[in-house]
Image (cartoon, rainbow, N blue to C red):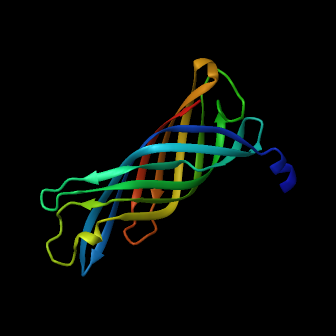
């Protein structure tokens, strides 16, 4: 059965676009808790590999990889700048337009629902909501988060159905100490 399934597997479209991510987390030290915020904007590349086709949809595995920049300005410390990275691996159920390779149509729309596991890292900043000397700049200089993620998207055909626009929303629940919850929005274009 594994051989039969992989026999039909094939690379599908690679979408490119822009993303915005925002995460919140909390750290506790000596009984004091601070709320952390992290965000970045970036470029996204989303290749998908279809490994099973059904009558109305398909199953695929993909990596919606995002690379971008983040920073903050602070009157006390001057601010920071760093690169942001989001690397999830997701298994998706694709339906409607874009569910199958080499499909061209200007009618209807399609989409996907998926789940997987992701890793996100970027610079982190926090509000000045702590009152003791337990914290220093290194506590907030980076945010690194990993955990399960969910995402969904809607695809619309354009230019005679050979190209498409996709709107993707994502959520990742952090399992690390700060427990960052990252939300993402992506606008993708398929050539």
Is 3 situated above or below 147? above
- Which quarter of the rendered picture does the C terminus lie within? top right
The residue depicted at 24 percent of the width and 53 percent of the height is: 72
Work out whether residue 107 can be spotted.
no
Picture quadrant where residue 81 is located: bottom left
The residue depicted at 30 percent of the width and 65 percent of the height is: 141
167 to the left or right of 81: right
Give how far across and how far down residue 108 sits, in percent. Answer: 61, 23
Give how far across and how far down residue 180 sits, in percent. Answer: 39, 62
Q: Nearer the viewer, residue 86 or 51?
A: 86
Q: How many dots with numbers?
A: 0
Is 175 situated above or below 13? below
155 to the left or right of 24: right
Is 141 situated above or below 113? below
Give how far across and how far down residue 3 sits, in percent. Answer: 86, 54
48 to the left or right of 76: right
- Which quarter of the rendered picture does the N terminus lie within? bottom right
Q: Residue furthest bottom?
A: 30
Give how far across and how far down residue 129 sits, in percent. Answer: 18, 65
Work out whether residue 154 can be spotted.
yes
């Amino acid at each position: 059965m594994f051989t039969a399934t992989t026999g039909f597997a094939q690379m599908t479209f690679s979408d490119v676009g822009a993303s915005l991510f925002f995460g919140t987390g909390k750290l506790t030290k000596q009984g004091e808790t601070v709320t952390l915020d992290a965000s970045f904007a970036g470029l996204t590349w989303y290749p998908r590999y279809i490994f099973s086709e059904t009558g109305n949809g398909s199953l695929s595995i993909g990596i919606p990889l995002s690379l971008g920049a983040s920073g903050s300005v602070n009157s006390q410390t001057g601010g920071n700048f760093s690169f942001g990275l989001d690397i999830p691996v997701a298994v998706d159920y694709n339906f409607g337009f874009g569910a199958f390779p080499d499909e061209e149509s200007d009618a209807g729309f399609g989409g996907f629902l998926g789940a997987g596991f992701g890793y996100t890292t970027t610079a982190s900043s926090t509000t000045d909501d702590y009152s003791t000397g337990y914290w220093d700049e290194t506590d907030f200089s980076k945010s690194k988060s990993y955990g399960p993620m969910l995402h969904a998207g809607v695809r619309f055909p354009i230019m005679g159905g050979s190209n498409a626009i996709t709107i993707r929303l994502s959520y990742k629940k952090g399992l690390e100490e700060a427990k960052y919850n990252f939300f993402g929005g992506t606008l993708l274009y398929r050539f």
